[in-house]
């Protein structure tokens, strides 16, 4: 029964309060998470042959609620259970608070529900409750900054989810159903102009969930806040934001006659570039990683909006790769911040000397995100570029160059000698074995995802793809050239850039965020009404 995937995490979350011993609680947590991973893998293998559908309430008509696992959602379900399992291993000795485990399991059940349900109103409810859970986890340590960041996250999501609610209400008015598959079939026979308003409403909410520019200012506050446990930051950046990407794919399918891939291709390019520029301006290691989440989401959206099978597959595979290398980076950053007592990149040096394992995992994750040869990011980026025209290819090269420059800056923490007067004494700080195991698994996946990239794509997406040796060697040369150029740009421009200093001090208020939501909604609405998008088609197709 598919309902077990949602119900079991919630039941476990509640039952943890029945056990007084923290050891028993942690044993149950690990056992449950491992069981969920196994069940998710079973569902994944079953959907290779056919979709799995479960009805709730024994209704066969539009009154019923269907849970469905298909070839796409099964990948997200496996990814969700795996990331939560890794987060559980990482937090095994770090957190004994039952509230933490309670919220973590509730959060997992809600995300699984999003990937399972076919009902648009269910998605609304699940997202709303997940927002509350995430807000509490962001504010978990109750620091002033964390409380502010958590409240901003909560309020901006409460505002934007109303767009989603109004949109699905309009869909129900047009089609008489909230089931995504039935709604998509019904909308094919409805006039295009009638679909534009609900499409704009729903896509505005989904775009904020994906952190598209200019709707991304909430993300660094949520992902980089000091008070959230590192495992929470890793799940937020590596997994939670993918629920928005998943909804983006589904909504584009529902509104196939109104969908604007050229528009969102342009948004993806802008998001990728603005994301890395903001990352370059930061000195907090978690904020650097948070802004690069925005940049990499832009790259994913580029892949998903080019009408080429290889490119779309590359976008899907980059979702998986981003989960692995970004989770590894956030978890290792949490360990580094604990060891050094600071998140200031200028005060952290000698990570390799202090902990060779953390240094090695950081290097593997950096190679992954920058698209270094033999690592997972190189494969997904290779396929994303394969179907792009010269303009989009140029934009992707710029985005990857910005990523390389950022992580040349970030990699400075691996070498040198720390300023002992500015950081904690690191010699007596023990490095948790469970945390080392968690990041090592993720680091190895960054490497294996590159070596066996074609096999992983074939397994996950049932796509027979192949890497052309000459094309891949060309990409290797491009990466080497970008690395050299990135080093000199960082050395002679980034360190003294006035623009980046202004970006560092730039702050967007809650009121401005709300204005941006309205502007983005109007932009989608106007584009849908007035454009046959000839300009977009010339530039991006």
Image (tube, rainbow, N blue to C red):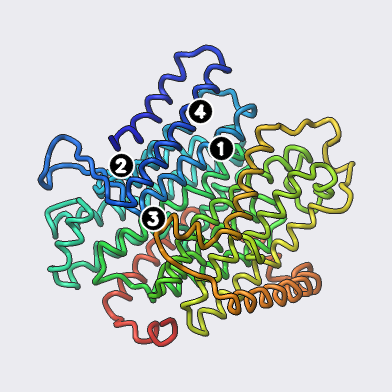
| Residue picked out by circle 2 | 125
Q: Which mark is residue 101?
A: 4
**How far is mark 2 from mark 4, CA to CA?**
22 Å
Please tell me which residue is depicted at 25% across the width and 50% down the height of the picture: 120
Left or right relative to 73: residue 505: right
| Residue picked out by circle 3 | 246
Compare marks 2 and 4 and give the one earlier in the sequence.
Answer: 4
Mark 1, residues whose alpha carbon is within 10 Å: few (<14), some, or many (≥20)? many
Q: What element carries label 3?
A: helix
Q: Quadrant of residue 72?
A: bottom left
Above or below, 399 relative to 515 = below
Please tell me which residue is depicted at 54% across the width and 22% down the height of the picture: 27
The x, y position of residue 330, in whole percent, is 63, 47
Left or right relative to 266: residue 451: right
Compare marks 1 and 2 and give the one earlier in the sequence.
Answer: 1
Q: In which quarter of the image is residue 125?
A: top left
**How far is mark 2 from mark 3, CA to CA?**
16 Å
Compare marks 2 and 3 and give the one earlier in the sequence.
Answer: 2
């Amino acid at each position: 029964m598919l309902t077990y995937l949602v119900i079991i995490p919630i039941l476990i979350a509640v039952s943890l309060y029945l056990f007084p011993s923290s050891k028993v609680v942690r044993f149950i947590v690990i056992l449950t998470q491992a069981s969920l991973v196994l069940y998710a893998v079973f569902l994944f293998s079953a959907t290779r042959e056919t979709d799995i559908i479960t009805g709730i309430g024994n209704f066969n008509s539009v009154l019923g609620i269907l849970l469905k696992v298909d070839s796409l959602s099964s990948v997200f379900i496996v990814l969700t259970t795996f990331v939560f399992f890794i987060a559980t291993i990482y937090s095994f000795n770090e957190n004994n608070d039952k509230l933490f485990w309670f919220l973590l399991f509730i959060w997992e059940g809600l995300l699984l529900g999003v990937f399972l349900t076919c009902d648009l109103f269910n998605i609304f409810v699940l997202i709303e409750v997940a927002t509350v859970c995430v807000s509490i986890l962001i504010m978990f340590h109750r620091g002033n900054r964390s409380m502010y960041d958590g409240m901003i996250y909560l309020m901006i999501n409460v505002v934007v989810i109303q767009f989603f609610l109004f949109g699905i209400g309009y869909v129900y008015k047009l089609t008489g159903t909230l089931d995504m598959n039935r709604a998509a079939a019904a909308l094919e026979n409805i006039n295009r102009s009638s679909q534009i308003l609900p499409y704009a409403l729903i896509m505005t909410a989904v775009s904020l969930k994906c952190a598209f520019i200019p709707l991304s200012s909430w993300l660094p506050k949520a992902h980089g806040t000091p008070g959230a446990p590192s495992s929470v930051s890793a799940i937020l950046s590596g997994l939670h934001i993918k629920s928005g990407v998943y909804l983006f794919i589904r909504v584009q399918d529902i509104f196939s006659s109104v969908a604007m891939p050229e528009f969102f291709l342009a948004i993806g390019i802008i998001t990728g570039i603005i994301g890395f520029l903001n990352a370059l301006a930061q000195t907090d290691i978690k904020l650097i990683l948070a802004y690069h989440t925005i940049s990499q989401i832009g790259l994913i959206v580029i892949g998903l909006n080019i009408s080429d099978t290889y490119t779309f597959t590359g976008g899907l595979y980059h979702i998986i790769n981003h989960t692995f290398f970004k989770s590894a980076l956030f978890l290792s950053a949490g360990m580094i911040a604990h060891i050094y007592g600071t998140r200031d990149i200028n005060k952290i040096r000698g990570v390799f000397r202090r902990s060779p394992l953390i240094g090695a995992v950081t290097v593997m994750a950096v190679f992954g995100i920058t698209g270094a040869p033999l690592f997972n990011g190189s494969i997904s980026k290779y396929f994303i570029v394969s179907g792009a025209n010269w303009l989009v290819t140029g934009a992707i090269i710029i985005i990857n160059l910005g990523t390389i420059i950022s992580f040349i800056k970030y990699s400075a923490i691996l070498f040198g000698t720390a300023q002992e007067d500015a950081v904690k004494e690191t010699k007596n700080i023990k490095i948790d074995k469970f945390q080392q195991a968690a990041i090592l698994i993720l680091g190895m996946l960054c490497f294996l995802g590159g070596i066996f990239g074609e096999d992983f794509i074939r397994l996950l997406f049932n796509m027979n793809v192949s890497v052309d040796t000459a094309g891949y060697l060309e990409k290797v040369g491009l990466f080497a050239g970008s690395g050299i150029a990135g080093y000199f740009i960082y050395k002679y421009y980034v360190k003294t850039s006035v623009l980046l200093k202004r970006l560092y001090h730039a702050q967007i208020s809650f009121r401005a965020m709300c204005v941006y939501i309205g502007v983005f909604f109007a932009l989608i609405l106007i584009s849908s009404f007035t454009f046959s998008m000839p300009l977009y088609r010339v530039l991006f197709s």
